Image: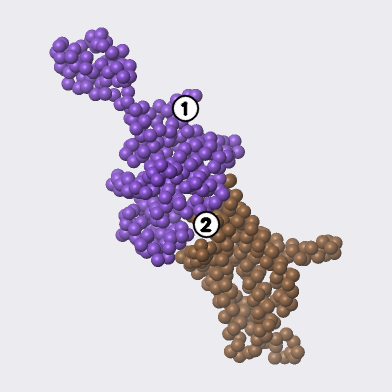
Chain colours: A purple, B brown
Amino acid sequence: MSNEALIVVENVSRFYAEHTAVNNISFTVKRGEVLGFLGPNGAGKSTTMNIITGNLAPTEGRVLINGIDILDAPKEAKAELGYLPEQPPLYLDLTVNEYLLFCAKINKVKLSHYRMTIDAAKERCGLTQVGKRLIANLSKGFQQRVGLAQAILHSPTIIVLDEPTVGLDPLQIREIRKLIGELRADHSVILSTHILPEVQTLCDNVLIINKGRLVLSDSIKGLRQRMRLAILRVAFLRPPSCEQLMNIKFVDQAQELGNGIFNLHFQPGESPAEELVKVAVVNDWGLFELVPGRLSLEDVFVDITMNEQLD
Amino acid sequence: MLMLHIASKEFKSLFISPLGWSILAVVQFIVAYLFLSQVNLYVQFQPGLSDSPGLTEIVVLQTFNNVAIILLLVIPLLTMRMLSEEFRNKTVCLLFSAPISMTEIIIGKYLGLLGFIALLLGMIMLMPLSLLIGGVLDWGLIFSGILGLSLLLSSFAAIGLYMSSLTSYPSVAAVTAFGVLLGLWIIDWTQGTLDEKYQIVLGYISIFNHYESLLNGVFSSSDVVYYLLLIITFITLSVRQLSAYRTQY
């Protein structure tokens, strides 16, 4: 059950007259998986999400939702989908209740369940207090929540969220994260975002897309591997010279950063840490800090997208 | 079922903004003025004439004729935001992501429009009915006139809906719909400069000719077919345009 692929994207491309928005992208999402979608502005994230949800027809390739082609049988495929686009699709002149009622109707929620589903969605998105207010009068954060409520209302198996935390305050962001954490139990979630820690805390898999091409598709675990660096950061009370440090086994290069702090570079898999501690004690350098260097996700992201641009 | 949900939403949303209310009020006011002046005309001249057109012809049918022209100006204002605004505010995403077909979206919106037009006609009909207080009406003529007016307004609405599917600017949709309707009205005003055979074709295309014969109590199926064809054509075009939206943008 947990291994079935809910979303299959096969060689999807989307061309505009002279401009390629998405170029030959393929990936799959399994049930219960949260997929993070990263990329600089204009990379094709939203285009891809629009294609997955049937808002945009791909020029080439196909999208299967639960095994159903979204272009061949759109009604069946879309019944499984909930989508929050970049700009929440809100009718500003309706109240929150009226709007969600309309969404429930067009998403074929059973008549007897209207009230229950709407109340549940409002509860989950923290909208219980504003049900009777006009959407136009709500703040950006609340409008975003209404959009989110609309996407999860009919409890679709696949939820696609295009930058769901934009415009929210930190507290609300935390709530949304909690909500996505709850949703993953029996839904698949595709999430695009600019906020990198969000991906680290929420997602199982990460896609990085740049200039319409998929440049990285990896699990969070794999990404963590990438983030590990062959660097040790050490600090001494009575710092030795660089030469002395470079004499230690496995140290390829020592770089002084000032205030007794050094970066030690070494070959991956050959950590000089043990040897270093021994030498430091013998020579009484006063070692008080030893930190394995780590790239942030941001570094990986910048690294990958920048390299792409150089190619 | 889904169609009816969309229809009822469209119908209601016309009354959420002041647009629906103001259209009802303004049209009612203008039609009432024209209606009263026809009643006045009838009262002044009719007693002196014998064997001449009656109350229905002079007051009711002439009012219907005026209503058609007023609504030619008004219907584009009703239809302009139907799809344009959905494109503009990107709310069309909501409909595209829901399990609804393009045909259901378009027909739903069209039915919503027809609901509003029915209400508008119902309110206008109260005026001829008020004549029953002191007069006798020719019901055959009136029903034929109502049929003609309903068909005419339904085709206005279909054309307006299609124009709204072409652009994300409601004002552009209104202007083009108005242009097409006006064009279909005046297309046979050629002042006799054309060949007879062309004149016949243009005369058939003209949207008001078919209305006039229904208004005169002549029920010909070719007139009814003309309007049905026009409606079906523009509804189909709208569905196609909405589907094409997904490949264009």
Q: Label 1 amino acid?
A: Glu
Name the residue nearer the viewer: B176 or A68.
A68
Left or right: where B76 falls relative to B51: left
Q: Can you tell which of label 1 and label 2 is closer to the viewer?
A: 2
Give residue B197's position: percent from left, percent from top.
84, 63
Residue tagged 2 = B100
Give residue B248's position: percent from left, percent from top.
58, 46
Q: Label 2 amino acid?
A: Ile
Q: Is residue A162 visible?
A: no
Left or right: where B211 falls relative to A14: right
Q: What residue is at 38 percent from the left and 29 percent from the top?
A: A300
Quadrant of the rendered structure where residue B233 is? bottom right
Tell me the element at label 2: loop
Residue tagged 1 = A308
Q: Chain of mark 2?
A: B
Instruction: Check the picture and name the quadrant holding the N terminus of chain A.
Output: top left
Evaluate whether label 1 is on the same chain as label 2. Answer: no
Outermost residue on the front side: it is A1
Tell me the element at label 1: helix
Left or right: where B29 falls relative to A139: right
Compared with A283, A30 (above or below) is below
Quadrant of the rendered structure where residue A173 is? top left
Compared with A194, A289 (above or below) is above
